[in-house]
């Protein structure tokens, strides 16, 4: 029997920022990672890209991964000659990935004429709160992590190399259907989670997957037993989770440790945080993803080598997608011009951006959706503490 439950306990992922934090961040905590630009102004010998990201707050772990990829991307671009002969620099803005803060920061970014594009934020909701301001200013907003289906709906200056959840969840459902015909599903109760699950459910139905139990949960949940007991008791072939890393670990740990569930688990997230938090319970987790350090894509392999040299560890998906966003924009501007107009023109005309995901080595943008053309995702399984490619 299908039912819906909602649990609200302590906030793990979606915090509410205090008024003081809002005022502080609205004053625009920022720095220039590369180049000689000062706050709000870039030298004539450099080109600036603004970054909205969670340096602090509950999403700070993702912000750290983003910054590693972004900094490495700038280092690579400048080592290769920069952008139209100028040094590329980043102007960082700590938003805590909160919509109130991105909306407050956006006007200052848009008014800074040295900024030719803006990338970020982590969550689609935070990004979309700022997009209208950038659209009005004719400043390209490149949401490299934003996969919610309507992200680019604000206007023609809003772009993302991310696949939509419609594309992703179709392949996710196909992965599940290979081994399971009767499932229990749980998903995070926010705009992204509801959108993603709706797409998965639609595709699951087409594939003949029976969803014998479903439930959402709020991101502040600390005890998911009330919704996972009936999930277990429905005797599914698999439990499917759609959410983030920390809550995915909570789901699988509850299923394994408290409820004795030993069946298949699909979900979690390709992050060290999920691997660490889930421990041995996470072993066998199955999912699809665009990237792993073992990817045979030659562009990805080159990135992995550079990342390991810089940080002495393997990169993850969030390192890769942030790195690629800088490479994308610099590559495009080097074919057009190092201006706001040049960025927009590049996204509309360049058809051979370097691709780091799946098996393709180049990509272009679908001009209707303003997203990367679709490709095949990698099928992954967590084995011996590492997500590895499977058949």
Image (cartoon, rainbow, N blue to C red):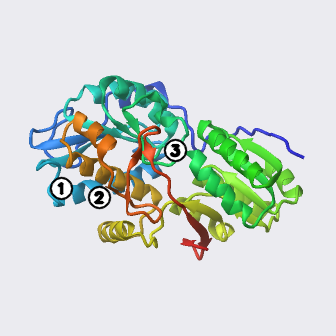
Label pair 2/3, CB-CB below 8 angstroms: no
According to the image, label 2 marks what residue? 72
Q: Secondary structure at mark 3?
A: loop
Q: Spatial distance from mark 2 to mark 3, Cα to Cα?
A: 23 Å
Q: Specify the quadrant of the image occupied by residue 257.
A: bottom right
- Quadrant location of the C terminus? bottom right
Upstream in the sequence, badge 2 or badge 1?
A: 2
Task: Name the residue furthest bottom.
Answer: 384
Q: Residue 32 placed where, x, y %?
A: 22, 43
Eye-nearest disc, 2 or 3:
3
Count up the numbered dots.
Answer: 3
Q: Residue 196 placed where, x, y %?
A: 63, 44
Q: Secondary structure at mark 1?
A: helix
Q: Residue 66 placed where, x, y %?
A: 39, 52
According to the image, label 3 marks what residue? 147
Upstream in the sequence, badge 3 or badge 1?
A: 1
The circle drawn on residue 232 is none
Relative to residue 288, is residue 221 drawn left or right? right
The residue that appears at 63% across and 37% down in the rendered structure is 190
Q: Secondary structure at mark 2?
A: helix
Q: Is residue 277 above or below residue 341?
A: below
Residue 258 vs residue 252, the one in the foreground: 252
According to the image, label 1 marks what residue? 78
Q: Specify the quadrant of the image occupied by residue 114.
A: top left
């Amino acid at each position: 029997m299908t039912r819906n439950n909602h649990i609200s306990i302590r906030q793990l992922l979606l915090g509410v920022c205090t008024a003081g934090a809002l005022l502080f961040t609205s004053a625009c905590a920022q720095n220039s990672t590369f180049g000689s630009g000062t706050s709000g102004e870039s030298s004539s010998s450099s080109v600036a890209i603004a970054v909205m990201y969670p340096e602090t707050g509950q999403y700070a772990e993702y912000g750290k991964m983003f910054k590693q990829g972004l900094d490495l991307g700038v280092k690579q671009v400048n080592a290769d000659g920069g952008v139209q002969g100028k040094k590329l620099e980043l102007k960082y803005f700590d938003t805590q990935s909160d919509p109130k803060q991105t909306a407050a920061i956006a006007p200052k970014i848009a008014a800074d004429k040295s900024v030719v594009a803006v990338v970020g934020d982590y969550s689609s909701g935070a990004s979309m709160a700022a997009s209208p301001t950038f659209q009005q200013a004719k400043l390209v907003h490149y949401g490299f992590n934003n996969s919610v289906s309507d992200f680019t709906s604000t206007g023609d200056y809003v772009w993302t190399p991310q696949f939509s959840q419609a594309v992703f969840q179709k392949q996710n459902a196909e992965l599940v259907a290979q081994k399971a015909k009767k499932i229990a599903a749980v998903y995070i109760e926010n705009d992204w989670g509801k959108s993603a699950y709706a797409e998965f459910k639609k595709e699951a139905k087409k594939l003949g997957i029976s969803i014998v139990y479903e439930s959402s949960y709020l991101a502040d949940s600390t005890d998911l037993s009330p919704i996972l007991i009936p999930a277990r008791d429905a005797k599914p072939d698999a439990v499917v989770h759609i959410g983030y890393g920390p809550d995915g670990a909570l789901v699988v740990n509850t299923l394994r440790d408290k409820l004795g569930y030993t069946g298949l688990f699909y979900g979690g997230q390709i992050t060290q945080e999920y691997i660490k938090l889930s421990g041995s319970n996470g072993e066998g987790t199955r999912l699809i993803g665009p990237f792993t350090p073992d990817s045979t894509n030659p562009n990805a392999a080159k990135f992995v080598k550079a990342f390991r040299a810089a940080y002495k560890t393997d990169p993850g998906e969030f390192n890769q997608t942030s790195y690629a966003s800088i490479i994308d924009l610099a590559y495009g501007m080097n074919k057009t011009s190092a201006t706001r107009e040049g960025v927009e023109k590049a996204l509309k005309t360049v058809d051979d951006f370097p691709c780091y995901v799946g098996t393709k080595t180049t990509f272009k943008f679908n001009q209707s959706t303003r997203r990367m053309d679709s490709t095949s995702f990698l099928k992954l399984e967590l084995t011996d503490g590492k997500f590895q490619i499977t058949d």
